[in-house]
Image (cartoon, helix red, strand yellow):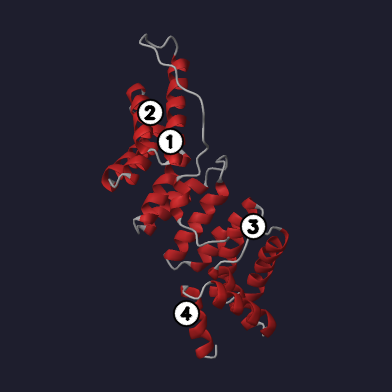
Amino acid sequence: MIRKVSVAFLMVGLVALSGCVTTSTSPFAREADRQEAIQNYVKLATAYIGQGNFERARHHLDRALELDPDNAAALSARGLVENANGEPELAERSFREAIDSDSGYTRGRVYYGAFLYAQGRFQDARNQFMAASRDTDYDDRASVFFNLGLTEERLKELERAETAYTRAVELSRGEPRTLLALSRVLVEEEKYSMASRYYSRLLSIMARNKSVTHSAESLYTGIRIARHFGDRDQEASLALMLRNNFPDSVEYQQYKVLISHGE
C-alpha cells in the first residue's frame, strides 16, 4: 500500500549482515587490517540497528570508535542509536562530529537530515539534504531528492519541491511514492495536466502490480485531478473507495469539505 512517507524510514533501510568479527589482543599488523575491523564493526552495528537491537549496535560501535574515534560512519551510526534511545542532544552531537570528521560522508548527512526533519527543523534539514544531493556517486540519490522534496513542502516551497520530486522520479524510474508526491505537489500548484500524466503512471503501476494499492492520499489526489477535468465517473469511483476504505482519514474529511463548497 502506498502510505504517507515518514522520513524516519530513511534512517533504517539497512542491509542485514551475517558473520562475526574476529578480534585479537595483538596490535594490528597493518593499517588495512585496522580499517577492515572498523568497517566490520560498523556493518554489524548497522545490522543490529535495522533489527532494533540498539544495545548490541552500541557495543560494536564502541569497538569501532576505540580503533578510530573520528570514524564518520561509526559516529553517524552512534547518532542513530542515541536518537532511538531518546537522547536527541547526544544524537545531534554525534551527527555533527561525523560531518566535521568527514564532510564528504553523504550517508551521515542523510541521517542528520532525517533527524533534523523529525525535530521540525526543516531549514536545517534542507541544508543537509541539499549537500547530500550533490554527491553523484551516492547509491540512493532518489531517496535524497524525495526527502528534499518533503522538506521543501514543509517550508511551503512548492516549486522547489516539484523540482526535487521530479528528480526523484527520474532517478527511481517512477517509484510509486515519488509519482504520488509529484502528482500531489503539481495539484497544489494547479498544474493539473502535468499532475494527470504522473498520476496516470501511478495508476498503470497499480494495474500491473497488485501489491501497490491506493492510500487515502493517492485517492484524494486522484479525486482532485478528476474533479478539475470534470471526469465524474473517475471522481465517483475514487471517492467511493476513499469513503469505504479510509472513512476516518484526513483526506476523506478534506473531500467532504471540497464537495460541500462545490469546488
Judge depth for marks 3 and 2 and give the one in front: 3
The three-letter code of the residue at mark 2 reads His
Dots 4, 3 in contact, CB < 8 A: no
| Residues at discs 4 and 1 in contact (Cβ within 8 Å) | no
Spatial distance from mark 2 to mark 4, Cα to Cα?
48 Å
Alpha carbons under labels 3 and 1: distance apart: 28 Å
Q: Earlier in the sequence, mark 2 or mark 4?
A: 2
Instruction: Name which of mark 4 and mark 1 comes first in the sequence.
Output: 1
Residue at numbered disc 2: 60
Q: How many marks?
A: 4
Ranked by sequence position, the earlier of labels 4 and 3 is: 3
Spatial CA distance of label 3 from label 2 is 37 Å
Indicate whether 117 appears above or below 159.
above
Residue ID for mark 3: 211
| Front-lying residue, 168 or 62 | 62
Where does residue 54 sit, x and y in percent of width and height? 36, 38
Q: Which residue is mark 1?
A: 48
Identified by mark 4, the residue type is Gln
Q: Residue 71 is drawn in which quadrant? A: top left
Residue 245 locus on image (x, y percent): 55, 72
User: Considering the numbered disc 4 on the image, is that residue within a helix, a strand or a loop?
Assistant: helix
Answer whether labels 1 and 2 touch (C-beta < 8 Å). yes
Which label belongs to residue 253?
4
Nearer the observer, 133 or 65: 65
Residue 185 visible in the picture: no
Kindly identify the residue that appears in the image at 51 percent across and 35 percent down: 16
At x 27%, y 45%, the residue is: 87
